[in-house]
C-alpha cells in the first residue's frame, strides 16, 4: 500500500507478486493508466521522459475510446496529472453522466459499487496531490458510501476525510 492509496496496480500485463510466486494479471488500459498515474504522483523522481510520453499516449488513446467507469476514472486522473483541461472536461462529463444515475448505481452488485467508489476515491486522492478542486467527486462519494460494506473502502474514504 502506498500512502493514502488503497491499492497499487501494476502497468498493463505486468508480473504482479502474489504471496510466494509471480502471477501475470491482465488489466484494462484504464487500470494501467490510473496505476501509473498513482505511482508517478507518489514517486515523481522515478518517472523517465519516455515513461511520461508513453503514459500520455495511452491517455490520449483512452480519450478517443473510453468505455466504462474504469476508463473514465483513468481519463480524469490522467487529465488531472497532466493538467490537460480538455481531457479533464471530457472525463468529468462522462463520469457525471454515469454517476448521476442513482438507480443504476444502487442496482450494481456490491463488488462493482466498491470498484466505482474506489475509482472516485483514487481520483479525489490524485486531485488533492495535484491541487485540483474535487468537491463534485466528494459529493458522489458521500452518496455512495452509505451502501458500501467493504471495510477497506470505508477506511480509504475516512483517510480522505469523506463524510457520509
Image (cartoon, grey):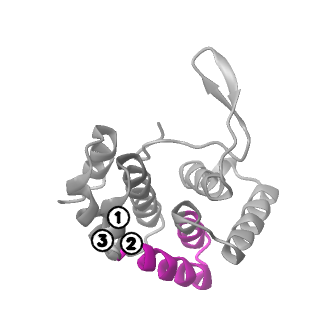
Please name whichever residue, 95 or 106, is drawn nearer the observer in this view of the structure.
106
Query: Would residue 98 be counted in the magenta stretch?
Result: yes
Between the C-alphas of marks 2 and 3, the distance is: 7 Å
Q: Does residue 29 appear left or right of residue 18 in this picture?
A: right
Identify the residue at image location x=62%, y=68%.
Answer: 67
Q: Residues within 10 Å of mark 3 (few under 14, many from 20)?
A: few
Residue farthest front in this picture: 107
Magenta range is: 74-100
Quarter of the image where the C terminus is located: bottom left
Query: Is disc 1 in contact with disc 3, using a CB cutoff of under 8 Å?
Result: yes
Q: Nearer the viewer, mark 2 or mark 1?
A: 1
Between the C-alphas of marks 1 and 3, the distance is: 5 Å
- Across and down, in percent, residue 93 comes to 49, 83
- Across and down, in percent, residue 124 comes to 40, 63
Relative to 136, say whether 49 is above or below.
above
- Across and down, in percent, residue 149 comes to 25, 43
Residue farthest left in this picture: 164
Between the C-alphas of marks 2 and 1, the distance is: 7 Å
Task: Report the magenta stretch's main SS.
Answer: helix
Q: Residues within 10 Å of mark 1 (few under 14, many from 20)?
A: some
Relative to 81, say whether 25 is above or below.
above
Mark 2 — residue?
A: 99
Q: Does residue 50 appear left or right of residue 14 in this picture?
A: right
Query: Is disc 2 in contact with disc 1, using a CB cutoff of under 8 Å?
Result: yes
Residue farthest right in this picture: 50
- Across and down, in percent, residue 148 comes to 27, 50
Mark 3 — residue?
A: 102
Mark 1 — residue?
A: 105
Identify the residue at image location x=46%, y=74%.
Answer: 95
Q: Secondary structure at mark 3?
A: helix
Amino acid at each position: 500500500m502506498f500512502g493514502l492509496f488503497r491499492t497499487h496496480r501494476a502497468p498493463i500485463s505486468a508480473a504482479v507478486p502474489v504471496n510466494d510466486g509471480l502471477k501475470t494479471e491482465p488489466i484494462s488500459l484504464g487500470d494501467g493508466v490510473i496505476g501509473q498515474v498513482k505511482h508517478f504522483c507518489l514517486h515523481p523522481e522515478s518517472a523517465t521522459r519516455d515513461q511520461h510520453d508513453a503514459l500520455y499516449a495511452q491517455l490520449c488513446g483512452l480519450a478517443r475510446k473510453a468505455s466504462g467507469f474504469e476508463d473514465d476514472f483513468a481519463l480524469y486522473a490522467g487529465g488531472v496529472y497532466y493538467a490537460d483541461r480538455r481531457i479533464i472536461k471530457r472525463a468529468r462529463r462522462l463520469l457525471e453522466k454515469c454517476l448521476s444515475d442513482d438507480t443504476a448505481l444502487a442496482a450494481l452488485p456490491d463488488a462493482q459499487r466498491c470498484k466505482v467508489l474506489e475509482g472516485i476515491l483514487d481520483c479525489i486522492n490524485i486531485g488533492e496531490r495535484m491541487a485540483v478542486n474535487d468537491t463534485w467527486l466528494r459529493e458522489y462519494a458521500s452518496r455512495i458510501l452509505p451502501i458500501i460494506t467493504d471495510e477497506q473502502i470505508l477506511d480509504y474514504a475516512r483517510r480522505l476525510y469523506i463524510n457520509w
